[in-house]
Amino acid sequence: MDRRPGSTMTVEEAIYRRRAVRSYAPAPLDRGTVRVLLEAAVQAPTAVHEEPWTFAVVQDRALLRRLSDRAKALRAEEAVAHERALDAAARARARQLSELLADPDFNIFYDAGTLVAICARPAGPFVEADCWLAAENLMLMACAMGLGTCPIGFAIPVLNAPDVKAELGIPPEQRAVAPIVVGFPRGTTPPVGRKPPDVLAWR
């Protein structure tokens, strides 16, 4: 099997070393590196071989900042609208989030220089699952290459705004499903513990 540049980890090592990285060095990724990640993404499993994924890559830092600011504004509006329905603990977390979003220096993309928005064609009931499988492939390959990644759920609403889709070349009938930032980690991200598998049945 062809071995991609930098992919020297075993699958097990990549699974256990992958982290959600939230601090990035300013060095940009070159197109060849991004292409390797996209090629890994499309090796993912796909229902009835639909391969419904498409990709919008954003490396323009001014555009990333503009998308971040707009996403923060949208999220802040949603938080105000839903805060009353929350219990006390959830309300406190929502307020912390609101304070973070109100910080003009906070960038939802964590200053990463590359955003890969994995989009879905309207090809069947499993397209979102397929796209997230592609996202996991991309993140594991990035880990194997010494890169950091982080899914950015906050970006989904703004990426699906009609004018943003038009700007990024995303067709109206498609939708952004899995936005992933990629870049060179600034420092190290410590491991986060995981609960053991919660097995509901084993018959």
Image (cartoon, rainbow, N blue to C red):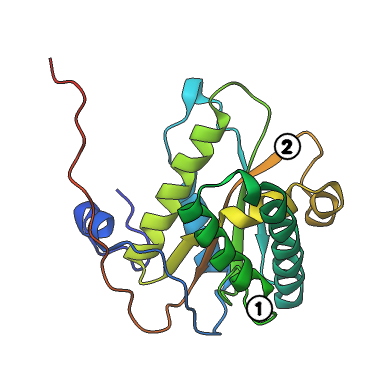
Horizontal relation, residue 146 to residue 39: left or right: left
Residue sitting at x 76%, y 46%: 170
Badge 2 marks a residue whose secondary structure is loop
Q: Quarter of the image containing the C terminus? A: top left
Mark 1, Cα crowd under 10 Å, few <14 / some 14-19 / many 20+, is few
Residue 13: % across, % down:
21, 59
CA gap between label 1 and label 2 equals: 32 Å
Horizontal relation, residue 93 to residue 83: left or right: left
Q: Are marks 1 and 2 in contact (CB under 8 Å)?
A: no
Residue that mark 1 sits on: 103
Give the number of callouts.
2
| The disc label shown at residue 174, or none | 2
Q: Is residue 55 visible?
A: no
Badge 1 marks a residue whose secondary structure is loop
Q: Is residue 122 visible?
A: yes
Residue sitting at x 60%, y 33%: 52
Which of the two marks, 1 or 2, is nearer to us in this view? Answer: 1
Residue 33: % across, % down:
50, 67
Mark 2, Cα crowd under 10 Å, few <14 / some 14-19 / many 20+, is some
In the image, 170 versus 179, the foreground residue is 179
In the image, 67 versus 42, the foreground residue is 67
Q: Point out the tag, 1 or 2, that comes first from the N-terminus.
A: 1
Give the amino acid at mark 1: Asp
Compared with 201, 187 (above or below) is below
Residue 192: % across, % down:
27, 63
Horizontal relation, residue 69 to residue 97: left or right: right
